[in-house]
Image (tube, rainbow, N blue to C red):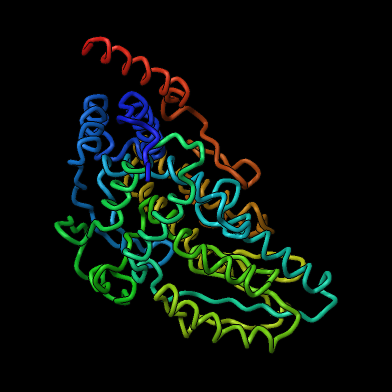
Amino acid sequence: MQLSLFNTYNRDQILTDLFKAYYDARRNKRNTINAIKFEVNYESNLFMLCDEILSHNYNLSPSICFINFNPVQREIFAADFRDRVIHHLIFNYISPVFEKTFIHDSYSCRKQKGTHYGIKRIDKFIRSCSQNYKQDSYILKMDIKGYFMAMNRRLLYEKVVNELNKNEKMKISFDLLLIFYLVEKVIFNDPTKNCIIKGKKSDWKGLPKTKSLFYADKDCGLPIGNLTSQLFGNVYMNEFDHFIKHDMGIRYYGRYVDDFVIVHQNKDYLKSLIPKIRNYLQQELHLELHPQKIYLQHFSKGVKFLGTVIKPNRIYIANRTKGNFYQAIQKHNRIARDHKPTKEEQAAFLSSMNSYLGIMMHYKTYRLRKRMIRKHLSGWWENYFYAKGYSKFVAKRKIVARPLGKSQLLQNARENIEVVRLLLS
C-alpha cells in the first residue's frame, strides 16, 4: 500500500512547514531560555532538525520536570524547544484530519472551542433539557482517574495510525511515513528518563501516584504540557464520544479532556449509565472512572465545570478561581513592596492580571473584579497601569516592542530557504 504522496521527501516543503511550526512554537514562549538559545541560530537549527527527521535520526531531548501548583498541583514535563517545534509540526499536519472525526461537543484544544465554549454549551444543555428550567432535569458529571497517566501508548498509536490510514486517499499535504515515524517517536518517548528535575523533592508531596508519570504502568502515560498530548487526549477518547452520542443516543453530552457531563430528564436513567460507561472505559480504553468524582444532582443545585459553577440563569466563578486570582495579586504586591518591578516583571503582571480578568469577564463578576482590584491590589501598580472597566489592565506606557507579524516571518523563512537552495545547487 502506498502511504506517501511523494516519491521522495519534499525537502523544501518540509522546511517551510518546520519554519511555520517554529513560529507557532515560540508564540508566548519567546522569552524562555530554551527558545532564546534556539533562536540565536534558528535557521541552522531548523535545517539540522529537517535533516534529522528526513534521515530518521531524530531523538528527543531531555524534558524539564517540575510541579505546577496553579490552579491545582500537577506534574509537568516541559519539552525542549526543538521538540516543541516537532510537536507543532505534527499538530499542524494531522489535527485537520482528526478534527473531522471529533464530535461537536469535545471542547479541549480545538479552534473556536475551549473552556468558555464548553461552559456555554453545558449551560445551554441544561436550559434546553429542562425546557427553560420548567421541567425536572438532572446532571451527571464524571471524571477519569489519572487520565493522562493511564492512557495506553500502544493503543493510542494504533488509533492514530488507523485513522490516518483511512484518510490516505484524501488530498493531504504531508508524507504519512514521515508522520508515522515522528508520532511513534513522540508517543513512545519516556520523559522520565534523563529528565531534569526542577524544584524540590517536597514539591511532589501530596501528589497522588495516579497523577505522576514516575508511577505510571509500563507503556502508559503522556506528559501533561505538550501540545501533542492535548491532541492525543482527544484522539484517545474519540471512540468513547461516539459511543455516548451515537451508540447510546445521548443528546446532551459534552467533554473537556477527562471531565464529561450528561444532562437528562430521568434520574434513574442517568444512574443506569454509570456501570455501562465504567465497563466501556475499562474494556475498550483501559481507563477507570474516578469513584469519588461522580456527581448526580438536580439542575437547581448547579454543577461545577471548568472553573465555574453553572446554575439556572447565572454562571459563577468557582471559589478556587477566586482564590487563585487573590494569590496572583498578592504575589505581584510582594514584588512591588520589595523593589521597583523590572520591565519583565511589569509584563508578567500585565499578562497574569489580564488572564484572570479575561476569564472572569465572561460571567457575572463585575462587582467581584472591582472589589478584588480596589481592595487588594497595591497602589504602586497604578503608576504603570490602569484597570479599564475592571475588565483589562492597560499599560500607561509601552513596555516591549511589537514583534514582526506571522505572515512576514513566514515570508522571510521562504526567502531564506530559497537562498540556501540556490547556494547548494
Q: In this view, does 357 lie to the left or right of 126?
A: left
Q: Residue furthest left?
A: 194
**Farthest front residue in view:** 1
Camera-side residue of 133 and 336: 133
Q: In this view, does 184 lie above or below 154?
A: above
In the image, residue 272 sits, relative to residue 214, either above or below, namely: below
In-front residue for pair 57/255 = 57
Q: Residue at x 19, y 68 (%)?
A: 201
Tell me which corner region of the image, top left, top right, bottom left or bottom right, holds residue 343: top left
In the image, taking residue 192 as reference, residue 298 lies left or right, namely right
Q: Is residue 373 visible?
A: no
Classify the position of the C terminus by image quarter: top left
Q: Residue 401, relative to residue 344: is it above or below?
A: above
Dividing the picture into quadrants, the one containing residue 313 is bottom right
Residue 131: percent from left, percent from top: 83, 71
Q: Is residue 295 left or right of residue 85?
A: right
Question: How many tags in the picture?
Answer: 0
At horizontal 29% and vertical 12% (from top left) the residue drawn is 419
Q: Residue at image x 54%, y 63%?
A: 256
Q: In which quarter of the image is residue 2?
A: top left
Residue 184 visible at all: yes
Q: Where is residue 224 in the image (x, y as percent from the top left)?
A: 35, 59
Please tell me which residue lies in front, 225 or 286.
286
* Residue 418 place in picture, x, y as percent: 33, 14
Residue 326 point in image, percent of width and height = 49, 60
